[in-house]
Each structure stands twice: as C-alpha cells, then as structure tokens.
Image (tube, helix red, strand yellow):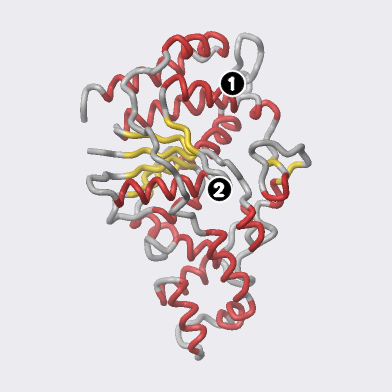
C-alpha cells in the first residue's frame, strides 16, 4: 500500500519544545528537547502507520501576505519585534520563537537530511498549504494510497476525506485518528464542513474573530441545516428567514465581507506549485556518518536509534 505520512513539522516541534522537559540537553548544555521530541514522534508513527512515504512539511512563510491582505488580524498576536529573516511573514516580521527553540531548528533540518527524510516548504505559503497540496496530489494520482497527517492543529481537519483516505492523527489527543465520522461527532457538522465551521465560529488562536454573535452551537446548527457555507450564503441571498436561527440572518448579512475574506484565509491551499518530491522512506539512514556525528554532538543517541529502528521495520514489508 502506497501510504503517505505528512508531518506538520512546526506544530510538532513547538509541541515537543513545550512538552519535553527543558532539562533534555546536549553535552554542551544546548537544549535539544524539540529535536528529540520530534524524532521520537516520527519513530512511533512510522512503526504504527507503516507508511511507504514521508514528508516533513515546513513554513516558508508562517503568515502569508495573501492571507494578511484579506484579514489583517491573521496571526497578528504572534508577531515578534524581530529582524526579518528567511521565515519572516507578511510585513517582514518573524513569528515569536523562543531562543532555545530557534537554536534547535537547524539541527532538526540536519538530522532529517542525514536520515534521508524529505523536507518541503514553498515560498509564500504555510506548512498547511504544502500538506494540502501533497495530500491532494497523492490521493488523486493513479495508484495513490491513503494519507495520514500528523498535526496538533485543528485547521487541517478540513482535509479529512473518507473517499480518498485522508485522515488526521491529532497530536493533542495522542495522535487519535480523525476521520469524517469523528468530525461530525465532535462538532455536530457534516464531516467535510470543518473549514466552513471555522469561518463562522472563528479561531482566536489564529486571530480570526468569526461572525459576531455566531458561536460553535449556531455555526453547527446552520451547517446541519444547510450542509455547507456556500448553501448558507445562497439562502442568505435568496431572502427569507427559513432555516436561520434567530438573529443569524442579520449577523451573517453584517459580516458578509468578513465571511467572503475568511473563506480564503481559512482554506488550505491545495495547488501550491511544488516540484517532484523524493518522499520514499529509506529503510536505513542515507548518511550514517553525518547522523552519528550529529547524535554525538547533540546527545541524540536514543532518539536517533529509535528512528533508525523504525525505518528498519519498513524493510519487513506491511
């Protein structure tokens, strides 16, 4: 089975940084908790999922200009007063990243490269967009297999699709599998309506206010009644109150400009221009000497061994 595993790498290394004790350090005292946490997650998920392919997806731009142009508050609360750098978002500012985490990011890159695990980003886009594009590309090609997305970010629930075998393994819940039935059970909405739900409800963690006066309950009621945001807006334009909870028509009408903009801001891009990706997982590290040097320098021996053993299990077949 040609199974693809897509890692929302920033989500995973941020979670590792905050979840693995800061006391996990290299011989020289440098914190390596994010590196070790990420490697351990990949090792466990490779053993559990047994993918043939893996891509670690990254943010080339964590706050893309096309999203900020539509809704200026998008991730605005995460902006740090920092010198622009390679990961700078819209306006030439960087996401606020703790110094101890920032120092670990080049190590993550180097270790993944030594293992031969693909790293992909795309100028002007977030990791979510890379994931959406690769998931769409893989599930839509002849012979394409299931896609598992590793993330702690609910935004990627919108990619879940039973027909194409795309699921999210949700880090917040010990990588519980999220499929369409799970989304319906969680939110009381159609399984493929998460993006519509997020537009209506909003997401304070991303600086998206949602439609004033329409919370999760009303958003779910609207989607349950109409099936999709497009159908809701069609009914709104047609006039009449049928199917709209009290006050919802007025609130949606007042927020129409926001809703139209939020559809693009919330929606994961599924056609980022990406070239071919060498995503087939090796059954052993491609540069064992470099990996051994990195493991020794940063005290990563246990995590490197676990990921090495996880890759070796792939040689055994399904």
Q: 278 or 89: which is nearer to us?
A: 278
Q: Kindly identify which numbered label has been placed on residue 125.
A: 2
Which quadrant of the view contains residue 61?
top right
- The residue depicted at 67 percent of the width and 42 percent of the height is 88
| Quadrant for the N terminus in the image | top left
Q: Is residue 245 above or below residue 304?
A: below
> How many discs appear?
2
Side of 232 relative to 190 (left or right): right
The x, y position of residue 14, in whole percent, is 58, 35
The residue to which callout 1 is attached is: 32
Q: Which of 155 and 186 is in front in this view?
A: 155
**Residue 286, how many percent across, how many down?**
39, 18
Distance from label 2 to label 1 (Cα)? 27 Å
> Could you tell whether 20 is left or right of 130 in the image?
right
Among the two numbered marks 2 and 1 on one chain, the one whose residue lies closer to the N terminus: 1
- Write the residue at 61% across / 24% down: 104
Give me the residue at 56% from left, 44% from top.
Answer: 123
Assess whether mark 1 and mark 2 are in contact (beta carbons under 8 angstroms). no
The front one of 177 and 270 is 270
């Amino acid at each position: 089975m040609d199974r693809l595993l897509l890692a929302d790498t920033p989500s995973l290394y941020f979670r590792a940084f905050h979840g693995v004790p800061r006391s996990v350090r290299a011989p020289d005292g440098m914190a390596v908790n994010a590196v070790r946490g990420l490697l351990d997650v990949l090792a466990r998920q490779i053993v559990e999922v047994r993918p043939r392919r893996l891509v670690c997806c990254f943010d080339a731009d964590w706050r893309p200009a096309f999203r900020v142009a539509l809704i200026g508050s998008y991730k605005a609360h995460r902006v740090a007063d920092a010198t622009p750098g390679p990961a700078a978002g819209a306006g030439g500012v960087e996401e606020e990243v703790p110094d101890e985490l920032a120092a670990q990011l080049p190590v993550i890159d180097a270790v993944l490269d030594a293992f031969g695990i693909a790293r992909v980003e795309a100028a002007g886009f977030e990791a979510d967009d890379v994931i959406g594009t690769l998931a769409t590309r893989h599930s839509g090609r002849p012979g394409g297999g299931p896609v598992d997305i590793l993330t702690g970010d609910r935004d990627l629930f919108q990619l879940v699709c039973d027909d194409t075998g795309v699921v999210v393994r949700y880090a917040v819940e010990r990588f519980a599998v999220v499929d369409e039935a799970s989304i319906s059970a969680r939110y009381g909405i159609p399984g493929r309506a998460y993006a519509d739900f997020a537009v209506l409800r909003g997401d304070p963690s991303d600086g998206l206010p949602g439609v004033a006066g329409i919370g999760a309950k009303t958003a779910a009621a609207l989607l349950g009644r109409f099936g999709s945001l497009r159908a809701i807006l069609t009914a709104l334009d047609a006039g009449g109150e049928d199917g709209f909870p009290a006050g919802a028509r007025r609130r949606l009408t007042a927020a129409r400009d926001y809703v139209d903009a939020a559809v693009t801001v919330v929606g994961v891009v599924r056609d980022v221009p990406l070239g071919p990706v060498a995503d087939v997982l090796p059954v052993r590290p491609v540069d064992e000497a470099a990996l051994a040097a990195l493991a020794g320098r940063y005290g990563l021996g246990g995590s490197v061994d676990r990921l090495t053993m996880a890759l070796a299990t792939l040689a055994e077949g399904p």
